[in-house]
Image (cartoon, helix red, strand yellow):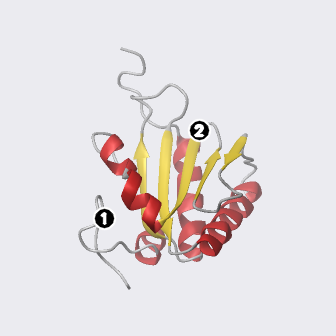
Amino acid sequence: MVGEGQAATERAVELVEIAAGAAADKLATDIIAYDVSEQLVITDAFLLCSASNDRQVRAIVDEIEDKLRKADARPVRREGEREGRWVLLDYLDVVIHVQHAEERVFYALERLWKDCPRIPLPEPAIAGGAARPGFPGSSGRGPR
């Protein structure tokens, strides 16, 4: 089986942690990271987060890109920026999905990746990006 026994690279986990912190800084919610390295050959990790409106989606994307640029990472692809409802940032090792809360619930990417291991996120990202109780994959902890 391709990728059997592999795990996300240290660089992928580092980028996920930086991006999660940046998202939390802009008040993203429901921040979750998955190690998809055993399921996909195109990337090691997915980071998912939500925003309450289109403007916040853009602010989160800008902050993530800024923080990752400082870590010497640049996206090879970005999609969805014009609409501002679901922006995908592809950093090869990590694919980041910043979704408007309505898209997040509708597409429910967590269902697709629920069998993949979660990547633990730093406490500020978990506390800052507190999830709503009952949201798939959420902890329900932190401010609302």
Q: SS of the residue at dot 1?
A: loop
Which numbered disc, 2 or 1, marks the residue closer to the eye? 1
The dot on residue 93 is: 2
Query: Which of the 4 quarters of the picture holds residue 35?
Result: top left
Q: Quadrant of the N terminus?
A: top left
Image position of 132 with respect to 114: above or below: below
Q: Is residue 87 visible?
A: yes
Give the residue type that dot 2 points to: Asp
Q: Nearer the viewer, residue 110 or 126?
A: 110
Q: Is residue 68 left or right of residue 52?
A: right
Where residue 90 appears, x then y in whole percent?
64, 43
Q: SS of the residue at dot 2?
A: loop
Where residue 89 appears, x then y in whole percent?
64, 49
Give the residue type that dot 1 points to: Ser
Image position of 107 with respect to 136: above or below: above
Image position of 32 with respect to 91: above or below: below
Query: Which of the 4 quarters of the picture holds residue 63?
Result: bottom right
The residue beneath circle 1 is 138
Judge the density around disc 2: few (<14), some (14-19), many (≥20) Cα neighbours within 10 Å. many
Q: Residue at x 47, y 37 (%)?
A: 8
The dot on residue 81 is: none
Where residue 101 appears, x then y in whole percent?
45, 67
Callout 2–callout 1 Cβ contact below 8 Å:
no
Q: Nearer the viewer, residue 72 or 33?
A: 33
Which residue ends up furthest to the bottom in the rendered image? 143
Query: Which of the 4 quarters of the picture holds residue 104?
Result: bottom left
Q: Is residue 122 visible?
A: no
Q: Residue at x 33, y 40 (%)?
A: 116
